[in-house]
Image (cartoon, rainbow, N blue to C red):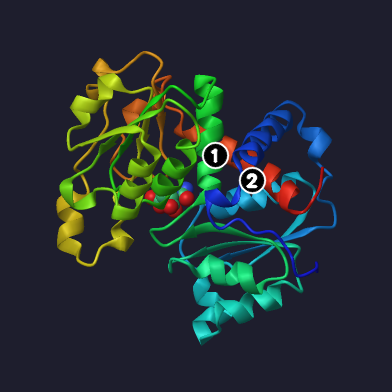
Amino acid sequence: MQGNKARSVVSILDLSTDEINNLMNVADEIDKNPEKYQDKCKHKILSTIFFEPSTRTRLSFEAAMLSLGGSVISTPDSSSSSAAKGESISDTVQVISNYAHIIAMRHPKEGAPVVAAMKASVPVINAGDGGHFHPTQTLADLLTIRRTKGSLSGLTIGLCGDLMFGRTVHSLIEAMLRYSDNKYIFISPNELRLPEYMRDSLNKSGVEWEETSSLEYAVPKLDILYMTRVQKERFFNEEDYVRLKDTYILDEEKLSTAKKDLAILHPLPRVNEISTAVDNDPRAKYFYQTLCGKQMRMALIMMLLGIK
Ligand code: NCD
């Protein structure tokens, strides 16, 4: 429904730092004055195509579009879409480009959204591709950090859990590297350490970072603790998953040495890695994070559709 030069967001690096900061400012405006935005996307259609399970990301996109006065068309899940009949991503997005003004897509194959963005004539937003990237989760994370810590600089950030396959981790690191004076502590079992390309990014940027397998060691040093789930669907065998899944469980006892103003984030879904008792701790920000996610997706949809 647009010309051929639609701008897509596949990686967080597709957005400049100024654009990210501006999206956060718009999200803050949306928070203060939601009614000012309720008709911004009137007569616009978002299509959500998810080839992998998702609850909050898809609903968050859909809620974002509906809160902007737009409409949503969606396939309930990949088994009921034509992909199940063998249709290529390229064909799917060319068809959807005639039905919707913007597409949010999740796919188990890394790089699938790049193909989609090349072939679609409307903007494509990557809502997660395999173990690769998840830029809109990162927008949610950044806004949560800025709102809870007042800044995106000068922080010690701990990322814990599945750092190998955790796409939210990879995107968040790429984004945080653009803000100054942050230190990183990566907490994972040996088998789930950060992939090589992420280590390269860290080394190239010259930031201070360290790895540990001990959550207890890291906790007292942190301003932000980003917990992640060990992702069953990315494992080749069940045994490894079972062995590693409960390596880290954050509970009130482990938090006893933490800073009073620590912010605990998690992209959700949570399995066992944060005890539900922590939910009542004022440092738990993971449910608030989902509100930030919706507001950032609203800001991003408007930006990609050229709506002020
Ligand atoms: C994450 C994802 O899908 O990558 N969740 C999300 O988008 N909210 C993390 C996860 O699935 O563990």
Place of residue 9 in the rendered image (x, y in percent of width and height, measured from the top left): 60, 55
Q: Is residue 140 left or right of residue 307?
A: left
Question: What secondary structure is found at the residue carrying circle 2?
Answer: helix
Describe the element under mark 1 as helix, strand or loop: helix
Residue 219 in view here: yes
In front here: 302 or 239? 302
Q: Is residue 275 visible?
A: no
Query: Residue beneath label 2, please?
Result: 297
* Residue type of the residue flagged with mark 2: Arg
Specify the quadrant of the image occupied by residue 21: top right
The circle drawn on residue 140 is 1
Residue at 68% x, 35% y is 22
| Residue for point 72% across, 70% down | 121
Is residue 100 depicted above or below 40 in this figure? below
Q: Is residue 145 above or below residue 37?
A: above
Q: Amino acid at mark 1?
A: Ala
Q: Which mark is residue 290?
A: none
Position in image of residue 32 (x %, y %): 73, 26
Q: Is residue 9 left or right of residue 102?
A: left
| Residue 308, image x, y percentages | 82, 42
**Residue drawn at (77%, 54%), measured in percent from left and top?**
305
Above or below — where is 22 with respect to 56? above
Q: Are marks 1 and 2 in contact (CB under 8 Å)?
A: yes
Picture mark count = 2
Is 197 drawn above or below residue 212 in the view shown?
below
Q: Is residue 275 left or right of residue 47?
A: left
Q: CA distance from mark 1 to mark 2?
A: 8 Å
